[in-house]
Image (cartoon, rainbow, N blue to C red):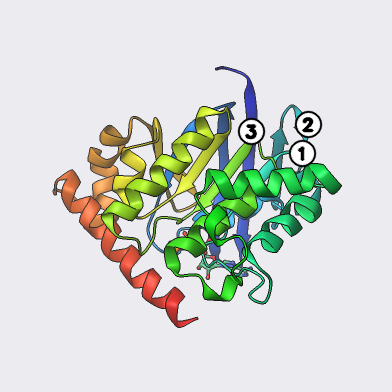
Amino acid sequence: MTEKLLELDSVTKRFGRVVIAEDLSLTVSAGDTVGIVGPNGAGKTSLFGLISGDLSPDAGAVTFGGKAVTRLDAAARCRLGIGRTYQVPRPFADMTVFENVLVAAQQGGGLRRKASYAAAAESLERTGMAGEANLPASRLGLLQRKRLEIARALSTKPRLLLLDEVAGGLTDPEVTVLVDIVRGINAEGVAVIWIEHVVRALTSFVTRLTCLYGGQFVGDGAPAEVLASPRVREIYLGGDLNTSAVEEVLVEENTVLEQEDQGK
Ligand SMILES: Nc1ncnc2c1ncn2[C@@H]1O[C@H](COP(=O)(O)OP(=O)(O)OP(=O)(O)O)[C@@H](O)[C@H]1O
Ligand SMILES: [Mg+2]
């Protein structure tokens, strides 16, 4: 598929001296699967903010589906088809799982009545959460909270799904299940950009991988090649180590992050 879906054109974003994006450009086509890695604090989540509309760039333009969205807020971009998950899931704890996805379908997706109920039910089916529909969200374990996070994004009917560390803290079999869920979503034509420290999840799914560092994308291509590139090794390890060592560092970072998330 070659239809351009998302374009970042020379986007720059800084928080004081912290550089998130420096003249950064990216094109994602309909149905693409793109993985993003990068050290803690590199600006990956902030990059999602720039795409989803939670953050405004200092310079540059964001285009989605051929429409300039740089000045649109997150609600407007969501209605155009940009759905995102959050690194730390924060469902409405006192609501049921179904109510959480219904709110997303109605408030995020702009769907009404039957259409919103149908989207909510379908998103729970597709994420394997239908059996938990009537549970309060506060009762969910980590895997279920991650699935609910995807279900909430899905019920807004996205054309582009942004996943921010949804595999973090999960066991290997749980990661496999999650990748299958995301693969199913992508198979229906939804493009996916996935930020993840659990590299196995990415390498088993994405066709493109890039590393965000210093406000720049380092490498953009086949996952194995990017992970093995000297520059990416250097970023993670100071150079001269193999791909699996890079993966180990990424997984270690993720474990620390998850422990932090649990403590929040
Ligand atoms: N709203 C904000 N105001 C000021 N600084 C911010 C803001 N949001 C993020 N930052 C800073 O920007 C940098 C990038 O943060 P971000 O969360 O985007 O990184 P990340 O790559 O997602 O990291 P991690 O892998 O730990 O999730 C950090 O130094 C962070 O403290
Ligand atoms: Mg992050």
Mark 2 or mark 1, earlier in chain? 2
Mark 2 or mark 3, earlier in chain? 3
Residue pointed to by mark 2? 67
Residue pointed to by mark 3? 6
**Residue most extreme to the top:** 2
Looking at this view, is 11 or 32 the one in front?
Answer: 32
Element class at badge 1: helix
Q: Position of residue 156 (x, y in %)?
A: 71, 46
Residue pointed to by mark 1? 80
Looking at this view, is 45 or 118 the one in front?
Answer: 118
- Of the two numbered discs 2 and 1 in the rendering, the one whose residue sits closer to the viewer: 1
Whether residues under marks 2 and 1 lie with C-beta atoms below 8 angstroms apart, the answer is yes
Q: Position of residue 20 (x, y in %)?
A: 54, 56
Mark 1 or mark 3, earlier in chain? 3
Q: Which residue occupies 24% across, 48% down? A: 233
Q: Position of residue 211 (x, y in %)?
A: 39, 45
Q: Amino acid at mark 2?
A: Lys
What crowding class fits label 3: few (fewer than 14 Cα within 10 Å), some (14-19), or many (20 or more)? many
Element class at badge 3: strand
What crowding class fits label 2: few (fewer than 14 Cα within 10 Å), some (14-19), or many (20 or more)? few
Quarter of the image where the N terminus is located: top right
